Image (spheres, rainbow, N blue to C red):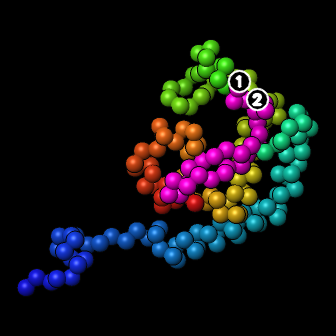
Amino acid sequence: MENNNSNQMDRPNNVKREVHPKNGLVYRFIKRTFDIVLSLTFLLLFGWFILLLMLIKFCEDGHNPIYTSKRVGKNGKIIKFHKIRTMKPNADKLKQELIDKGLNEADGPVFKMKNDPRITKVGKIYRKLSLDELPQIWDIFIGRISIVGPRSPIFEDSNTRITESNYRKMAYYCQ
């Protein structure tokens, strides 16, 4: 006799329902706890250093040292993503001028130049040492992003960058 259980009617008898462990409450709780403990520890130990980096950047040009960009997070949610600003304040305007001159060395929506004139002197050092990424520790602490998982794509580039496969991966890993 056939079993009329609705779960079995939805799939063939030889296919078992697969539950992804990263969807479970325990996994998400452990991951979030890990993010909070590590980011809080880092902020307590090195928060002064991040503030010093921001002060140096402010002294360089007198503008806001924090750059906020929009990223695509879990389930397509738009999140704010913080970095120490490494470019001139009018970098977006300059980018369009450089594109119009045909100086983009990359294909697609990404803009790349070997010696990008928009990057400041301090910005070059911060980028070389990845110091511009340190404010993301705060984003981890407040739960916008996670230590574990892929980097969220830039919102402006997301329409051309995100494939269905990548979107499914982001749904599992990004917060």
Measure the alpha-carbon separation of dots 2 and 1.
Answer: 6 Å
1 sits to left or right of 94: left
Residue in the picture at 82% in, 58% down: 46
Magenta range is 67-94
Q: What percent of the width, then of the height, locates residue 2? A: 10, 82
Task: Name the element at disc 2.
Answer: loop
Residue assigned mark 1: 94
In this figure, which residue is indicated by the disc labeled 2? 90
Question: Residue 105: image x %, image y %?
Answer: 57, 22
Above or below residue 168? Residue 109 is above
Q: Residue 64: x, y in percent?
A: 83, 42
User: In the rendered image of this protein, does residue 127 appear above or below residue 175?
Assistant: above
Disc 1 crowd, CA 10 A, few/some/many (<14, 14-19, 20+): some
Left or right: residue 40 versus residue 109 is right
Which residue does the image show at 62% across and 58% down from the upper left?
Answer: 145
Give the amino acid type for the residue marked by disc 2 in the picture: Asn
Q: Is residue 143 visible?
A: yes
Seen as rendered, the residue at the extreme top is 101
User: Quarter of the image holding residue 56?
Assistant: top right
- Whether the residues at callouts 2 and 1 have beta carbons within 8 Å, the answer is yes
Magenta stretch encompasses residue 109: no
> Which type of secondary structure does the marked residue at label 1 adopt?
helix
Q: Quadrant of residue 102?
A: top right
Relative vertical location of residue 138 with respect to residue 107 in this rendering, above or below: below
Residue under the point 15% across and 83% down:
3
In the rendered structure, the answer to whether residue 149 lies left or right of residue 4 reads right
Q: Quadrant of the N terminus?
A: bottom left
In the rendered view of the protein, which quadrant contains the C terminus?
bottom right
